[in-house]
Image (cartoon, grey):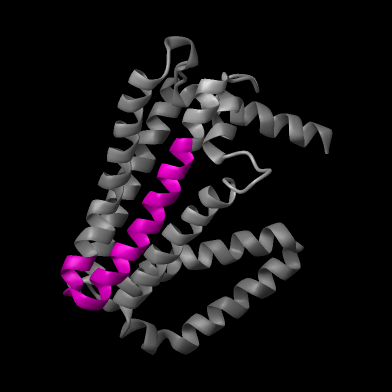
Amino acid sequence: MTGLGPTAILRGLAVGLLVVAWAVLAHYGSAGDSPSDLSAALACAPLLAIVVIVLWRVGSPLRVALGGLVVLAVLVWQWPLLRQNIALLYFIQHVGTNLALGALFGRTLLKGRVPLVTHFARLAHDGIISPLKEKYTRRVTIAWASYFMLTALISTILFVFAPASVWSTFANLLGTVLIALMFVIEHLVRLRALPPEDQSSIADTIRGYRLSTRQKTESS
């Protein structure tokens, strides 16, 4: 198996620190304990980034620039309203992300499709996995799809019926912890459910993904 190099480890640590910092700032913003302008800007930043990425993929640089200006104009126009509904912005962001991820995993479980975790496993093993691992990875895909959908449901219930601080603790502070816990549990289950030859690391998956992406780029 291929290990992660120092650069990849440092990059991962930097991303982890950014995620923690974002979670803390989002929590205080949702609970109303930080300046509203800063909180609104942080809440809108991911949505703006998604719009820019979508525009970049489907349009020319000119369309990206025009689309970005339109989005910025709308933000400036609606800024007073956004400042008064910061918790709602974070809620839409949190539920929307979990629903999108749940759909991403779930749609690959439809007949004729390859479950997403099975796809990752094939990337890590040069496209070939055992029937046992194929069955296991399908179940893991179901587990992740269920997790994201359940998270969106709990988030909605807490947002509607619980204080903002309680919802924010679940959505912003516990969100990353729960995902990490899912990875840990899946890893422990995998060690017991699969033989050593069917085991793979995150580094193997990343290597396979990069190789697959490179091959698609070269063939296009």
Q: Is residue 179 visible?
A: yes
Place of residue 73 in the rendered image (x, y in percent of width and height, measured from the top left):
55, 83
Question: Quick one: 63 or 197, which is closer to the camera?
Answer: 197
Q: Residue at x 65, y 23 (%)?
A: 127
Q: Position of residue 11 (x, y in %)?
A: 42, 34
Look at the picture and state if 206 lies above or below 200.
below
**Quadrant where the image shows the C terminus:** top right
Q: Main secondary structure of the magenta part?
A: helix
Task: Look at the image and give the residue range highlighted in magenta.
Answer: 139-167
At 73% from the left and 69% from the top, the residue drawn is 63
Q: Residue at x 57, y 22 (%)?
A: 131
Left or right placement of residue 78 versus residue 218 in this view: left
Report the side of 219 relative to 108 (left or right): right
Q: Is residue 129 left or right of residue 80?
A: right
Q: Position of residue 194 (x, y in %)?
A: 42, 18
For this orientation, the residue located farthest to the right is 220
> Is 140 part of what is drawn in magenta?
yes
Based on the picture, tell me whether residue 145 belongs to the magenta stretch. Answer: yes
Residue at 61% across, 59% down = 53
Decide which of 37, 29 is in the foreground and name it.
29
